[in-house]
């Protein structure tokens, strides 16, 4: 039987094993899952799953490509980079440098014009663009430079973007019911978001334990 990967959180649906949490019997084909079935870990819709290739099938090597050109950074991006650098400095116990990057990030952000026409649809489009274009481009650059740190960060970024997209899609379908009687948990390390009655035992993206999760209040 086949296996299907949740592209949001990495959970694997194994047809042989079924899904105990959602009362799906063993040997249930993915196509026979109920219409309303969602990922037992992150709640993503069935459409977010893809079939896993047979591990015994041979992999075809990919041709090498030139890295794409990176355009000049906007102020918003500079601000995001400065706040990431501030966090990096904090982790390395360099509070003075962290304070400088924090104030730089703030200054850059405050100099930005206010966003206009903000909507969930626009946000969803933006996240789609990240997943389809920006992240793969950044991955190619990192691969060509053998930058494993950047690759790891981008793998996280991709998963976090996928959960954001999944949640926006669910919000469009369910509206405020999405979080009714549930708690919103945020992984402070990688940014993954969970909406459930309890936090998962560990983050499926970066593996930090559940006590690290922050609860998001509205
Ligand atoms: Zn999932
Ligand atoms: Zn995490």
Image: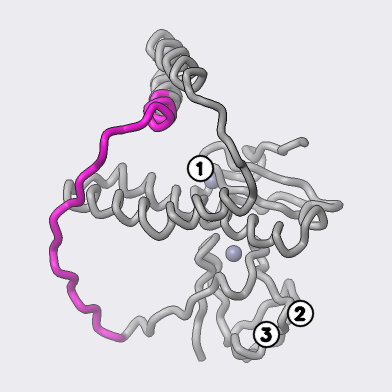
**Residue 67 location in percent, x, y?**
17, 51
- Please determine whether, in this image, residue 128 is positioned above or below residue 32: above
Image height of 218 relative to 93, above or below: below
Residue in the foreground of this view, choosing between 132 and 56: 132
Residue segment shown in magenta: 57-82
Of circles 2 and 1, the one toward us is 1
> Could you tell which of marks 1 and 3 lies nearer the N-terminus?
3
Name the N-terminal-most of marks 2 and 1. 2
Q: Name the residue tied to disc 1.
A: 190
Callout 3: SS: loop
Among the 4 quarters of the image, the one containing residue 31: bottom right
Give the residue pinned by disc 2: 23
Asked if residue 72 shows in the view, the reply is: yes
**Which mark identifies residue 158?**
none
- Residue underneath mark 3: 33
Q: CA distance from mark 2 to mark 3?
A: 11 Å
For image coordinates 36% across by 51% down, the residue present is: 134
- Residue drawn at point x = 57 percent, y = 76 percent: 13
Looking at the rendering, in which quadrant would you find the C terminus? top right
Please rate how many residues cluster around mark 3, counting C-alpha atoms within 10 Å: few if below 14, some from 14 to 19, many from 20.
some
Mark 2 and ligand 1: say if the CB distance to the nearest ligand atom is below 8 Å: no
SS at badge 1:
loop
């Amino acid at each position: 039987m086949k296996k299907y990967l949740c592209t949001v959180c990495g959970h694997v649906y194994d047809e042989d094993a079924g899904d105990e949490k959602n009362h799906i019997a063993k040997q249930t084909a993915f196509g026979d899952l109920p219409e309303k079935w969602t990922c037992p870990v992150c709640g993503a819709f069935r459409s977010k799953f893809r079939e896993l290739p047979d591990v015994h099938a041979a992999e075809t090597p990919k041709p090498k490509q030139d890295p794409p050109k990176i355009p000049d950074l906007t102020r918003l991006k500079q601000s995001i980079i400065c706040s990431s650098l501030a966090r990096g400095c904090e982790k390395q116990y360099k509070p003075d440098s962290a304070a400088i990057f924090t104030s730089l990030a703030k200054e850059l952000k405050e100099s930005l014009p206010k966003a206009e026409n903000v909507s969930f649809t626009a946000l969803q489009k933006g996240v789609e663009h990240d997943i389809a274009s920006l992240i793969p481009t950044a991955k190619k650059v990192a691969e060509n430079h053998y930058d494993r740190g950047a690759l790891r960060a981008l793998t996280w970024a991709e998963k976090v973007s996928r959960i954001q997209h999944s949640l926006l899609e669910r919000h469009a379908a369910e509206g405020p019911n999405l979080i009714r009687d549930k708690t919103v948990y945020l992984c402070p390390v990688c940014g993954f978001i969970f909406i459930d009655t309890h936090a998962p035992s560990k983050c499926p993206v970066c593996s930090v334990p559940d006590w690290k999760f922050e609860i998001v209040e509205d």
